[in-house]
Amino acid sequence: MKKVILLPVLFFLLRFSLSAQQDIMVSQYMFNGLLLNPAYAGSHKYISSSLLHRTQWAGLEGAPKTSILAVDGPFNNEKMGLGLIVSNDHIGVTDQTDLYANYSYHLKLGEGKLAFGIKAGVSRYTYKFDDLVIWDNNDQVFVGNRSTAWLPKFGTGLYYYAERWYAGISVPSLVAYDPDNNFGMNVNRTSFVRRHYYAVSGYVFDLNSSFKLKPSILLKYVPAAPLEADLNVNLLYRDQLWFGVSYRTNDAFTAMIEYQTNNRFRIGYAYDYTTSKIRNYSSGTHEIMIGYDFGRELVKVKTPRYF
């Protein structure tokens, strides 16, 4: 059996072989819910776009690096929404590239709207064996320079939103199909992907004429793994500058800031301080996000982006 001396292989085993976190996860998801829930698409009166890059566990060889482009907007008199996500997740000797289309249907309900969403797309997994340092060159598992796998995926979600609060549930990978297996609704049998279940909620409170407070929570559940929670508190100053802190159970504390320069452009930064033993080998996680909103209805929006 090949023995490898690079840490990235350990990451690969944890990421793909075990029932661990497989969906891409970032810290500034509360500023773009499309990353978690397809029903978020079209929840604003204008087209919204964002570009995010995350360098996880900086200083640690083979640590994850994630880049995401997301665009969504309404159509058909805001009754429907469309969204697109393109992402790349590089970890060790592996690359995961995702391309997803999102669709949502919005119904007026009470003081807000209830949206039903679906997503469909494909994930491309590539493993570069040339980057491994190997002792035994006779193992057939690693024959060749590269291995590639394609997995179509389908997901769904519900999202309720009003002017000051929101709540949603989603399963981004409800079905994943490996062509080497028989198709079926049991994702455990059709691929190595495990379903991730998300529940989110948040509310915006007025503190005074200058400050607003937005607490929020994200619950994440993967079968055969402990329930994980993100507890977030964000403070908005004069409808323009966000300051936030977050705690991810058994993982990290996060500090973040977002500046909304005008009705269209915003930029954000987040820093994760890892609470696990990885902190002994890493200087933390850095994440930057740039957003731009555009469309005919944008000039009519009088309130800032709360979520």
Image (cartoon, helix red, strand yellow):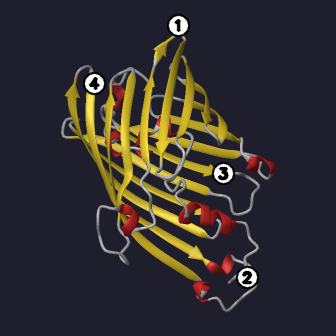
Q: Which residue occupies the foreground of this view, 176 or 99?
A: 176
Q: Kindly identify which numbered label has been placed on residue 134.
A: 2
Q: Earlier in the sequence, mark 4 or mark 1?
A: 4
Residue positioned 49% across, 77% down in the render: 148
Seen in the picture, residue 111 relative to 12 is either above or below; the reply is above
Image quarter hosting the C terminus: top left
Residue most toward the bottom?
138
Residue positioned 35% across, 21% down in the render: 163
Which amino acid type corresponds to the residue marked 1 in the rendered image? Asn
Which residue is tagged 4?
A: 112
Q: Kindly identify which numbered label has been placed on residue 56.
A: 3
As measured in the structure, the alpha-carbon distance from the residue carrying label 4 to the one carrying label 1 is 24 Å
Number of other residues with Cα within 10 Å of mark 3, as a class: few under 14, some 14 to 19, many 20 or more: many
From the viewer's perspective, is the residue at label 1 or at label 3 nearer? Answer: 3
Residue positioned 66% across, 81% down in the render: 130
As measured in the structure, the alpha-carbon distance from the residue carrying label 2 to the one carrying label 1 is 62 Å
As measured in the structure, the alpha-carbon distance from the residue carrying label 3 to the one carrying label 2 is 26 Å
Determine whether, in the image, residue 56 is placed left or right of residue 27: right
